[in-house]
Image (tube, rainbow, N blue to C red):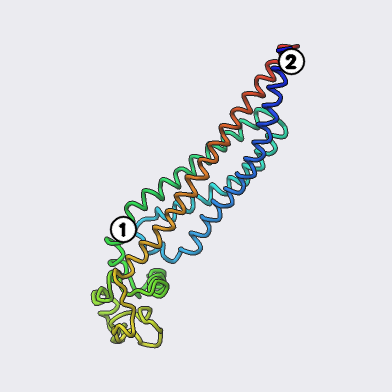
């Protein structure tokens, strides 16, 4: 009687774990979609600003999330097949992929957090130099476009203030046409509007574009870090459930073999 009760209990645990794993796979796909979406959104929406950063850490974090999200789509399907078939070999492969994705997303989250800590210093050290030395220079069209979009999107002028443009290679050249700031500094862009730097004409934002861009990137780094680490924890929970399920199947196989 006790042996039968024990067998029933183990069968009940197996069924419960099976349904839990199905539920996990649904959450897994949702989490994967979130990871993939955040990665793509970061690169598509913020791609112009990536050329203004000295390091590629921000972009690398987004690419890692895209890789992890793609793996989730494949792994989720594998997980469903493994649970239905109750084959330990398939479940072991699924378990391996869960741990792999866990590590990938954890790396993305940690990278985002580390870069968040040094973002301010990097922008202060490099943004002004990038803007003044590369704006409107041959072969630097990407940076020029990024600076123009930055100043228009955030309604700012110069890295710290509009006076930063007095050191610009472009403004000091004849090609500037007598401008004191680029036309993208103007509140209403018209031809040669950058010749006048009066507050009624150009943006005079305290802290300049550095403050605006820093806050913008910091907010998105927090999203990348939170999504990466949060979904990584979900993967870890799934790996533990899978390990328990594999163990129960192993015990059942041993008992069936012993009964023979």
* Residue located 35% across and 86% down the image: 193
The secondary element bearing badge 2 is classed as: helix
Quadrant housing the N terminus: top right
Task: Please determine whether, in this image, residue 106 is positioned above or below residue 131.
Answer: above
Pinpoint residue 69: horizontal percent, then vertical percent: 56, 49
Locate residue 86 relative to residue 205 in the image: left or right. right
* Residue located 72% across and 14% down the image: 257
Locate residue 134 relative to residue 87 in the image: left or right. left
- Alpha carbon separation for disc pair 2 and 1: 65 Å
Task: Please determine whether, in this image, residue 210 is positioned above or below residue 137.
Answer: above
Quadrant housing the C terminus: top right
Mark 2: few, some, or many residues within 10 Å (few <14, many ≥20)? few
Pinpoint residue 225: horizontal percent, then vertical percent: 44, 49
Locate residue 132 relative to residue 260 in the image: left or right. left
Q: Residue 248's quadrant in the figure?
A: top right
Residue marked by disc 2: 4
* Residue located 69% across and 22% down the image: 9
Locate residue 246 relative to residue 180 in the image: left or right. right
213 and 59: which one is in front? 213
Pinpoint residue 245: horizontal percent, then vertical percent: 63, 28
101 and 7: which one is in front? 7
The answer to which of marks 2 and 1 sits earlier in the sequence is: 2
Exactly how many numbered labels are in the figure? Answer: 2
Q: Residue 180's quadrant in the figure?
A: bottom left
Task: Please determine whether, in this image, residue 134 is positioned above or below residue 23.
Answer: below
Task: Please determine whether, in this image, residue 58 is positioned above or below residue 237.
Answer: below
Q: Which mark is residue 232?
A: none
The secondary element bearing badge 1 is classed as: helix
Residue marked by disc 1: 120
């Amino acid at each position: 009687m006790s042996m039968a009760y024990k067998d029933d209990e183990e069968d009940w645990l197996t069924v419960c774990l099976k349904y839990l794993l199905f539920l996990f796979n649904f959450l897994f796909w949702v989490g994967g979609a979130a990871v993939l979406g955040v990665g793509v959104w970061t690169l598509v929406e913020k791609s112009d600003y990536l050329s203004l950063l000295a390091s590629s850490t921000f972009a690398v974090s987004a690419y890692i999330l895209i890789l992890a999200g793609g793996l989730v789509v494949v792994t989720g399907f594998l997980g469903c097949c493994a649970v239905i078939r109750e084959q330990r070999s398939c479940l072991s492969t699924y378990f391996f992929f869960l741990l792999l994705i866990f590590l990938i997303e954890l790396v993305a989250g940690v990278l985002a957090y580390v870069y968040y800590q040094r973002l301010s210093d990097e922008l202060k050290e490099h943004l002004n130099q990038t803007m003044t030395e590369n704006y409107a220079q041959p072969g630097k069209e990407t940076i020029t476009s990024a600076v123009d979009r930055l100043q228009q999107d955030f309604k700012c002028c110069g890295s710290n203030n509009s006076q930063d443009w007095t050191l610009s290679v472009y403004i000091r050249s004849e090609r500037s046409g007598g401008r004191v700031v680029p036309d993208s500094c103007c509140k209403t862009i018209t031809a040669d509007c950058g010749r006048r730097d009066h507050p009624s004409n150009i943006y005079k934002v305290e802290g300049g574009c550095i403050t605006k861009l820093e806050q913008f990137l910091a907010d998105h780094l927090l999203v990348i870090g939170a999504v990466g680490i949060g979904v990584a924890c979900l993967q870890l929970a799934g790996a533990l459930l899978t390990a328990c399920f594999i163990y129960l199947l192993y015990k059942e196989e041993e008992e069936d073999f012993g009964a023979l």
